[in-house]
Image: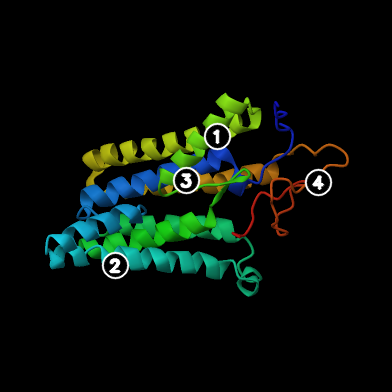
Amino acid sequence: MTTPRPEPHIAVATAKSVRLGVLLAAVGGFLDAYTYITRGGVFAGAQTGNVVLLGVDVAGGRWIEALAFLPPLAAFVLGVATAEFIALPAVAKIVRRPVRAVLVFEILVVLVVGFLPATVPDAVVSVILAHVAGVQVTTFRVLVDSPFNTTMTTGNLRSMAMAAFHRVVEHDLEAGTRARRFGAVISGFFGGALLGAVAVELFGLRAIWVVAVMLTIALALFVFDERTPRSLPPKGQSPNRSGAMDSNTSPGPGLPAADEPPK
């Protein structure tokens, strides 16, 4: 049985949009390439890689080298906790636009990191950026209507493969749309890693400022979408299909909000 095409005129919250997902995936790929090349072979967001390398060093009796992977893991966990803290109702009353606040936080952090000299220990920088990655991956975790990840690609690759299977075998058009979305996000992650490697070659430690530019563009998407008229859903259909829920953003009656707290 063929699944109907998803309605193209239903607006999607900016925080869950494909373009933002691709952009933030590029940020995730860039950060991993940056820390791996410039800061001792440690990944900022791909904690699976850090756990694997930790196990390899422990197995080889390289205890000092193994210890280098523990601080980023702890910082990533702290970043997740930070994002969850921002999402608490009591905090949301103070931080009125939590998603944008997270982007501003990321921008400020990477700007500061770009000023740090090479004499600053690698562990310090990797910890800072792992915390940023933890905040980002927890805040941005829905792509339109599907769970996804902006700092690693294994889960996204699985989701793309599953969707592609259902598109081919069951002729599910909506699954085909999901497969293309995840394909775009995976391409964004790859492109970000590629850009990160090239930028480090050109600009050295200052290459991290490219991430600040990318995050500024992401922040601008919220402002642009808030000021751009968006289509109303058909009569009788729920306006909240995209899952948007930020009451502090008002894109218009019956429209999903552009910004939303993580959930």
Mark 3 to mark 1 CA distance (whole Å): 21 Å
Q: Say if mark 3 contacts mark 2, CB within 8 Å.
A: no
Is residue 140 toward the left or the right of residue 197 in the image?
right
Front position among marks 3 and 1: 1
Which residue is disc 3 drawn over?
A: 24
- Residue beneath the point at 52% across and 36% down: 162
Give the CA distance from mark 4 to mark 1.
25 Å
Secondary structure beneath dot 1 equals helix
Q: Quadrant of residue 167?
A: top right
Instruction: Please state, as top left, top right, bottom left or bottom right, where the C terminus lies in the image.
Output: bottom right
Q: Earlier in the sequence, mark 3 or mark 1?
A: 3
Q: Is residue 149 left or right of residue 195?
A: right
Mark before the other along the chain sequence, 4 or 1: 1
Three-letter residue code for mark 3 = Leu
The residue lying furthest to the left in this view is 61
Q: Which residue is the site of mark 2? A: 71
